[in-house]
Amino acid sequence: MLAGIYGLMESFLPFSFMKYDFIKNSFLAILIITPLFGLLGTMIVNNKMAFFSDALGHSAFTGIALGTLLGIANTDLSMAGFAVVFALVLNVIKRRKTISADTIISVFSSVSMAAGLVMLSKNGEFSKYSSLLVGDILSIQPKEILLLFGIFLLTLVFFGCCFNALHAQSVHEALARSRGVPVAAVDNAFSVLIALIVMFSIRWVGILIINALLILPAAAARNLASNMREYHRFSVAISLFSGVTGLLLSFYNDTATGPTIVLAAAAVFFLSLGAKVVFHL
């Protein structure tokens, strides 16, 4: 199946770009992961969860460290398991509203990353995982691409079932609850989905930049869109454009792929912001 897709891509893209298998793999991964981030980012921005997704990324090292201590060889599994627990606990504390949500998230983010770094550095294993900071999309393998595609389909199903509830919750939580929306359940499900996507993507995207890829396309789309439908379409299109453009630029300029994609997304954001100011969008 992948061979047929690669053959189709080669007919549309420069041969010098597509002659390497790792480029083909990374290009296909970007075609899957960037629309996923664009779609997810809209609801993250709408629900004011930008700090939340960032905190999840920072918790990756703690997940790895705990997995190492417990003898779990699969780091993806230990990161995902810890992230799900982390997200649910954070939601419970956040709902108590004893202190502001951004303060709670910032504290959890700092503590989880510091704890992970301390545990890994004590065992002398941190150097093995330092690549997670910036990620390496060029190292992705076909089986991992299929995993990303499965997550993409899961996200589409989730949005198909819960989009109205999520949107209602982001507009007015109390009103959504009065209309029978199970706010806590939907919020927990969305948080778990974010946790899984962040953890399964972090190896290729990077801890330091994954939040930027989630937020920048959605923020740019918000500058341009006049309604919710346009907002989602613009976000997915901008995310896809930034991913492909960043990969091409990194290939021809020999730069790190993840940060180059972020800079492409940032350029679109500032252009959209300028357009909003000039044309009063």
Image: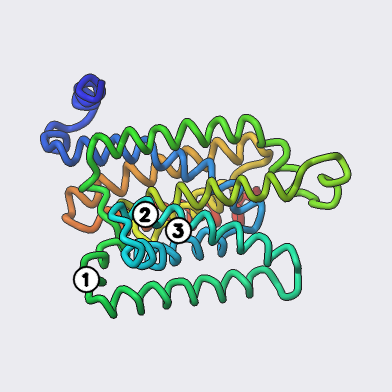
**Residue at the extreme right:** 178
Q: Is residue 14 above or below residue 94?
A: above
Amino acid under label 1? Ser
Judged left or right of residue 154, residue 49 is right
Q: Is residue 242 above or below residue 63?
A: above
| Disc on res. 212 | 3
Q: Which residue is mark 1?
A: 127
Q: Quadrant of the N terminus?
A: top left
Q: Secondary structure at mark 2?
A: helix
Q: Secondary structure at mark 3?
A: helix
Amino acid under label 3? Ala
Q: Residue at x 72, y 50 (%)?
A: 184
Q: Secondary structure at mark 1?
A: helix
Q: Which one is nearer the viewer's eye here, 131 or 245? A: 131
| Disc on res. 202 | 2
The answer for how far apart the CA atoms under marks 2 and 3 are is 12 Å
